[in-house]
Amino acid sequence: MEIIIQSDADATSITAARMVARLVKEKPHAVLGLATGSTPLKLYQELVRLHQQEGLDFSGITTFNLDEYIGLPRDHEQSYYSFMWENLFSQINIQPQNVFIPDGMAADVPEACAEYEQAILNAGGIDLQVLGIGSDGHVGFNEPTSSFASRTRIKTLTRQTLKDNARFFEGDETQVPHHCITMGIGTIMDAGCILMLAFGEKKAQAIASMVEGPVASVVPASILQHHARAKVFIDEAAATHLKRADYYRWVYEGKPNWQLDA
Ligand code: PGA
């Protein structure tokens, strides 16, 4: 795991965006795995800027989103479908047929999950997966005790996640759907590389457990210790519980230029 600590969320996101942009340039038909929530917003803004001001071309790119609430229609303002179109897809030149987001209204959820896994395979697999982390250590919506071998499936959210996400539902935890479709941990681990983002003190404990704690399904993100190409982009606030933060800073500062955006 490579830990990249920057001063604040904006600086961190801009550094992370360079890694995505480099892949998009080098592999015009790359497959991106994308995340929602407040964490990746600045990353998406920077990708939009790179598209609009520097011509970064998404016309051949395919995307797969991590998760979606069950029971929210696509046009619901809090569906992840709405989130992605509002914050990224409507502002870049991606082709709508290349966008995949789990369908939270699917009549047959297990069948829709199997089809989602097959669509990822058909696209050639995910080259780069963007991830946030829940304050309970989840990735995607793989809550604590999720199987490390899991594939796309239905999950029940924890009380902690319902509380964390209530801010998107007028602060009312009871309005947050309890169930979701999420890529599994096995699905995420199949990605060629992982780009995790985390900001703020609220994420500091989850980050420390993921990076420096034991690999255990009670901290689903800790499985990333087993991924050969996982980069963790965090701000100073999210780094406060890391025991070896100075070492991670030292490593990053000593990197040769040619390694920086890889
Ligand atoms: P957040 O969510 O970006 O809204 O903090 C992250 C997550 O739950 O994975």
Image: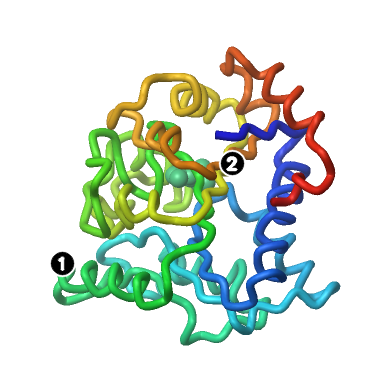
Question: What distance separates the C-alpha of mark 1 from that of mark 2?
Answer: 31 Å
Of residues 175 and 209, the one nearer the viewer is 209
In the image, residue 134 lies at what x, y percent?
43, 38
For discs 1 and 2, the disc positioned in front in the rendered view: 2
In the image, residue 116 lies at what x, y percent?
30, 71
Tell me the amino acid under the disc marked 2.
Answer: Lys
Tell me the amino acid under the disc marked 1.
Answer: Pro
Instruction: Judge the density around disc 2: few (<14), some (14-19), many (≥20) Cα neighbours within 10 Å.
Output: many
The residue that label 2 is drawn on is 231
Q: Could you tell me which residue is drawn at 79 percent across and 76 percent down?
A: 52
Is 188 placed left or right of 60 in the picture?
left
Q: Which mark is residue 184?
A: none
Residue 166 appears anywhere in the view: no
User: In the picture, residue 94 is in which quadrant?
Assistant: bottom right
In the image, residue 196 lies at what x, y percent?
55, 44
Q: Could you tell me which residue is drawn at 72 percent across and 69 percent down?
A: 48
Is 221 placed left or right of 155 in the picture?
right
Q: Could you tell me which residue is drawn at 31 percent across and 50 percent down?
A: 186
